[in-house]
Image: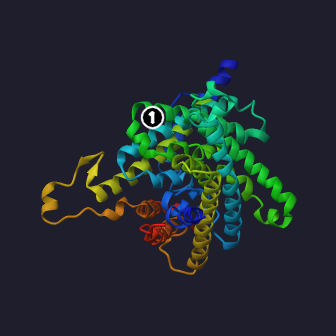
């Protein structure tokens, strides 16, 4: 009996419902373009693809584990102090990530500067913990965390790719625009490196996304 | 004194929290629909930044930093607790927000009711933690510099959020392409405001 109860909601590990948890945040429920969560870091660190990749991986790690931990603790957390508990769990995970980054990719860690610490207040993580992990089993929570972090990471990489390609002519530090282009007078657009262009790039991404999926259009 | 004014002005215009570092973007976008609410949030951020940055400054210099524990005795001089920074700062911020909330409720009930829900929400506003982390990174020389940096950052956020709210109130009457309405156009306007603020960049104070 108890075994049946266990397997019934689980079905297989990748049932359609669970797959949806993974895929929805990448498209229709994207945390950045639709839910408007966790924007701060998207804008600030997307000058280069390399830094964004490191950031995206860090967020995936923190979010997956934070969701798992909160989901495991969900019956033990008194509702009144849940925000402090969540912040503590996230802060502990972020400290781990920060130490790992400092040990293995020190130059990127310098470049990200305060933004690794700011993963703590990244509202995607708090938002998903509140909205999902507090009321759901461990495995779906893990998938939800990974899915949302992946949706976040995909936008991060997209913005970074656009900015690095147009702003410096490189991707991941490798030159993409061939030299003869520069010889016939092509010039990198220095404006793309500057912070305001990140906002405008995200604005255009939202425009394209909502143009293709009319149900997301803001009617207010 | 001159130094303090310079830090204050730098924090408002040149290193503006929103336009130069994109901190506090979430609440900046969510609460900027009308000017009234955005004034409330902006004021709350000025308050909380003005309190938390100096407190975290003390924490950094007397507990967390390398050799900061030397006042306890010479055997503590080599202790470096800086890996605890994040967890300590966020705890201080959560506690200070609670404290500021209680103080305002006691001292000025009218202000308290106008700030309403925004005060508790500020604990997870990244501009607050960001302010403390920047303070740590830039090594301000004394307490009053930290106070002036905190207040300046808060005022910078205030200016930004009130500005965007005013523009958003007006833009409701414009014919924006449907997919760009709401979030999209807000991003693009913020980008343009950011470009405008960049004109302060070369100023040496």
- Using the image, name the chain to which the residue with label 1 belongs: A
Q: Name the residue under label 1.
A: A101
Left or right of residue A150: residue B1: right
| Dot 1 alpha-carbon crowd within 10 angstroms: few under 14, some 14 to 19, many 20 or more | some
Place of residue A166 in the rendered image (x, y in percent of width and height, measured from the top left): 30, 59
Left or right of residue A135: residue B127: left
Place of residue B104 in the rendered image (x, y in percent of width and height, measured from the top left): 81, 59
Residue at 47% over, 52% down: A42
Task: Identify the image quadrant of residue A120.
Answer: top right
In the picture, the quarter occupied by the N terminus of chain A is top right
In this view, the residue in front, A116 or A211, is A116
On the question of residue A1 being in view, the answer is no
Task: Identify the image quadrant of residue B157.
Answer: bottom right
Q: Is mark 1 on a helix, strand or loop?
A: helix
In this view, the residue in front, B166 or A202, is B166
Task: Identify the image quadrant of residue B155.
Answer: bottom right
On the question of residue A124 being in view, the answer is yes
Place of residue B156 in the rendered image (x, y in percent of width and height, measured from the top left): 59, 65
């Amino acid at each position: 009996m108890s075994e049946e109860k266990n397997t019934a909601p689980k079905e297989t590990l990748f049932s359609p419902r669970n797959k949806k948890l993974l895929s929805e945040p990448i498209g229709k429920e994207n945390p950045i373009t639709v839910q408007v969560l966790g924007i701060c870091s998207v804008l600030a660190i997307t000058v280069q693809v390399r830094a964004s990749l490191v950031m995206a991986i860090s967020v995936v790690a923190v979010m997956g584990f934070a969701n798992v931990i909160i989901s495991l603790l969900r019956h033990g957390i008194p509702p009144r102090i849940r925000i402090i508990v969540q912040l503590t769990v996230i802060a502990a995970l972020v400290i781990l990530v920060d130490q790992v980054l400092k040990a293995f990719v020190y130059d990127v860690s310098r470049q990200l500067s305060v933004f690794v610490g700011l993963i703590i207040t990244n509202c995607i993580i708090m938002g998903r913990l509140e909205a999902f992990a507090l009321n759901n089993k461990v495995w779906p929570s893990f998938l939800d965390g990974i899915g949302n972090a992946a949706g976040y990471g995909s936008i991060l990489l997209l913005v970074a790719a656009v900015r690095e390609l147009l702003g410096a002519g490189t991707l991941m530090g490798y030159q993409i625009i061939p030299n003869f282009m520069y010889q016939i007078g092509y010039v990198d657009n220095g404006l793309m490196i500057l912070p305001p262009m990140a906002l405008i790039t995200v604005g255009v991404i939202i425009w394209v996304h909502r143009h293709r999926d009319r149900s997301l259009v803001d009617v207010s | 004194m001159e130094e303090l004014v310079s830090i204050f002005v730098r924090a408002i215009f040149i290193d503006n929290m929103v336009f130069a570092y994109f901190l506090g973007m979430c609440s900046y976008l969510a609460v900027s629909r009308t000017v009234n609410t955005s004034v409330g949030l902006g004021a709350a951020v000025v308050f909380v930044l003005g309190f938390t940055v100096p407190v975290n400054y003390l924490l950094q210099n007397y507990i967390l930093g390398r050799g900061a524990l030397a006042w306890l005795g010479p055997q503590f001089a080599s202790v470096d607790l800086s890996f605890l920074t994040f967890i300590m700062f966020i705890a201080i911020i959560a506690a200070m927000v609670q404290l500021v909330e209680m103080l305002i409720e006691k001292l000025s009930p009218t202000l308290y009711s106008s700030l309403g829900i925004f005060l508790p929400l500020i604990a997870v506003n990244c501009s607050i933690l960001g302010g403390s982390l920047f303070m740590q990174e830039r090594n301000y020389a004394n307490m009053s510099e930290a106070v002036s940096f905190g207040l300046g950052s808060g005022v910078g956020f205030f200016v930004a959020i009130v500005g965007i709210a005013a523009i958003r109130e007006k833009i409701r009457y414009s014919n924006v392409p449907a997919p760009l309405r709401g979030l999209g156009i807000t991003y693009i306007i913020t980008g343009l405001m950011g470009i405008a603020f960049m004109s302060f960049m070369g100023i040496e104070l």
